[in-house]
Image (tube, rainbow, N blue to C red):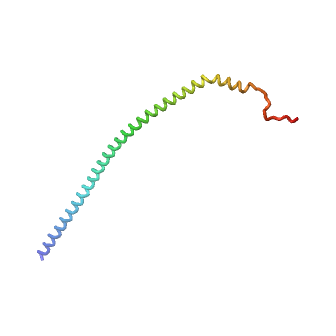
Amino acid sequence: MTSQSQGIQQLLQAEKRAKDKLEEAKKRKGKRLKQAKEEAMAEIDHYRLQREKEFRNKQTNVMGSQGNLSAKIEEQTTETVRNLTSSYHKNMESMMKKLLNTICDINPEVHPNFRHAF
């Protein structure tokens, strides 16, 4: 009976050691998963920063050329406004004279379609 009880004790101890090893393996697995997740997040952040930097560079290149276009358009608009203003000042007096002559010089005539009712 003592050998049986001793055998049972050995089995219980072996079971306990196996259980401890299993728990330790689970803890190591959990740690490793956590570490792998952290490494993956760091890699993702690095990749994201790299892509954002590339995007900003491309955006700067594109927006820089658009800025040049905007400046050219602004310059052309200013030039056009300047030309129109000078043309207005140059032709204003002659146009006013023509308008006043057309309005004030009345030449009364009978319309050709008018029929006398005699």
Q: Nearer the viewer, residue 13 or 67?
A: 67
Q: Residue at x 36, y 42 (%)?
A: 55
Residue 41: x and y, percent? 30, 50
Mark count: 0
Residue placed furthest toward the bottom: 1
Q: Residue at x 24, y 55 (%)?
A: 32
Quadrant of the frame with the N terminus: bottom left
Q: Residue at x 68, y 24 (%)?
A: 98
Q: Residue at x 57, y 27 (%)?
A: 84
Q: Is residue 47 left or right of residue 95?
A: left
Q: Nearer the viewer, residue 97 or 4?
A: 97
Quadrant of the frame with the C terminus: top right
Q: Is residue 106 left or right of residue 97?
A: right
Above or below, 108 relative to 14:
above
Q: Is residue 70 left or right of residue 105?
A: left
The quadrant in which residue 85 appears is top right
Residue 103: x and y, percent? 72, 27
Above or below, 107 relative to 33:
above
Residue placed furthest toward the right: 118
Q: Is residue 72 left or right of residue 88?
A: left
Residue 67: x and y, percent? 43, 34
Q: Nearer the viewer, residue 20 or 5?
A: 20
Residue placed furthest toward the left: 3
Residue 26: x and y, percent? 24, 60
Q: Nearer the viewer, residue 103 or 28?
A: 103
